[in-house]
Image: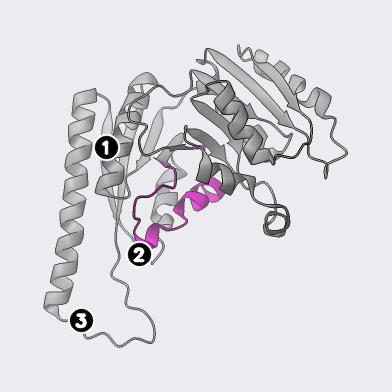
């Protein structure tokens, strides 16, 4: 198993400059075809507001959008030419105020989707929430990178968070290409008091045996319930083991559960400063 079709979500010129070094490096590492996707902003008049949009207004808007599109394409062409990887530029016009619709269509036809973790960079209004959409609805593993990661190694030391759910099972199996190349792997189980039926003392060892049949050797660490939440424990363990990749399921609970007990996925996406591979 390997990643042979990688999609890089180049949401802006700034995002492209930060995401492309790692995207090209991964494409070379896995001998994969890299697609760079930019979704162009849609001109969407808001209901209830009278807009007298003349030719000048439309012209200025489409010129700005086209100029941004060309600049991102130049960055993509320069990066992929230098890396010498198989590459394809793709630009799509958003057809609604939610550009994630167009991203999903390309994501579901890829082996791996790359984007940046939420950061301080200003994002277009129609890109808000697109990461959640990719994680939950694309059906593909999404690798999210800090905006300052550059071309540093990804996946030499891996922390895999395991809780026996469908989401964590998918994440670990989708992450096999990284796990099979990693120098160090730790499977982390964190006891959840609200799930008394699970035997956490054996859970990590069971999945470790499954991975061993794929040639993956992993250490297992079990953390009992404590004062720190699951998200904090994941971050603490990843830091203590000097990991450069976290693999975990995303959004495995209902919205009501997340409201009452907190949202581990949102916490990790907000606070983690190393790459994380997620599936929903």
Instruction: Report how far apart the C-alphas of labels 3 and 2 lie in the structure.
Output: 18 Å
As drawn, the residue found furthest toward the front would be 227
- Whichever of callouts 2 and 1 sits on the residue coming sooner in the sequence is 1
Vertical placement of residue 118 versus 180, above or below: below
- Front residue of 40 and 249: 249
Q: Magenta segment: does it hold 124?
A: yes
Instruction: Report how far apart the C-alphas of labels 1 and 3 lie in the structure.
Output: 35 Å
How far across and how far down the image is residue 257, in percent? Answer: 72, 55
- Front residue of 101 and 190: 190
Q: Which residue is mark 2?
A: 95
Q: Which residue is mark 1?
A: 88
Are dots 3 and 2 in contact, CB under 8 Å? no
SS assignment at label 1 = strand
| Circle 2 Cα neighbour tier, 10 Å, few/some/many (<14 / 14–19 / ≥20) | some
Instruction: Report how far apart the C-alphas of labels 2 and 1 lie in the structure.
Output: 22 Å
SS assignment at label 3 = loop
Q: Which contiguous range is marked in magenta?
A: 116-143
Q: Is 72 situated left or right of 118 in this image?
A: left
- Whichever of callouts 3 and 2 sits on the residue coming sooner in the sequence is 3
| Circle 3 Cα neighbour tier, 10 Å, few/some/many (<14 / 14–19 / ≥20) | few
Marks 1 and 3: which is nearer the front?
3
How far across and how far down the image is residue 198, in percent? Answer: 84, 34
Q: Which residue is mark 3?
A: 53
């Amino acid at each position: 198993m390997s990643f042979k079709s990688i999609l890089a979500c180049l949401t802006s010129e700034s995002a492209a400059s930060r995401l492309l070094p790692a995207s090209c490096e991964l494409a070379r590492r896995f001998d994969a075809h890299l697609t760079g996707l930019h979704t162009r902003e849609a001109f969407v008049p808001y209901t209830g507001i009278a807009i007298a949009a003349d030719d000048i207004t439309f012209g200025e808007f489409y010129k700005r959008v086209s100029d941004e599109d060309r600049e991102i394409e130049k960055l993509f062409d320069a990066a992929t030419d230098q890396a010498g990887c198989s590459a394809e530029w793709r630009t799509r016009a958003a057809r609604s105020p939610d550009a994630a619709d167009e991203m999903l269509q390309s994501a579901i036809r890829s082996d791996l989707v790359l984007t940046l973790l939420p950061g301080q960079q200003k994002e277009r209004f129609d890109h808000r929430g697109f990461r959640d959409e990719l994680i939950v609805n694309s059906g593909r593993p999404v690798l999210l990178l800090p905006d300052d990661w550059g071309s540093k190694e990804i996946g030499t030391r891996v922390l895999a968070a395991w809780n026996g759910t469908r989401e964590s099972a998918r994440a670990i199996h989708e992450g096999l290409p990284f796990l099979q190349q990693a120098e160090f792997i730790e499977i982390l189980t964190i006891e959840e008091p609200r799930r008394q039926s699970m035997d956490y003392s054996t859970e990590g060892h069971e999945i470790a045996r499954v991975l061993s049949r794929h040639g993956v050797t992993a250490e297992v660490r079990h953390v009992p319930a404590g004062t720190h939440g699951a998200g904090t424990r994941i971050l603490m363990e990843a830091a203590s083991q000097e990991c450069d990749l976290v693999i975990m399921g995303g959004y495995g609970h209902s919205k009501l559960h997340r409201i009452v007990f907190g949202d581990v996925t949102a916490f990790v996406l907000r606070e983690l400063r190393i790459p994380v591979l997620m599936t929903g």
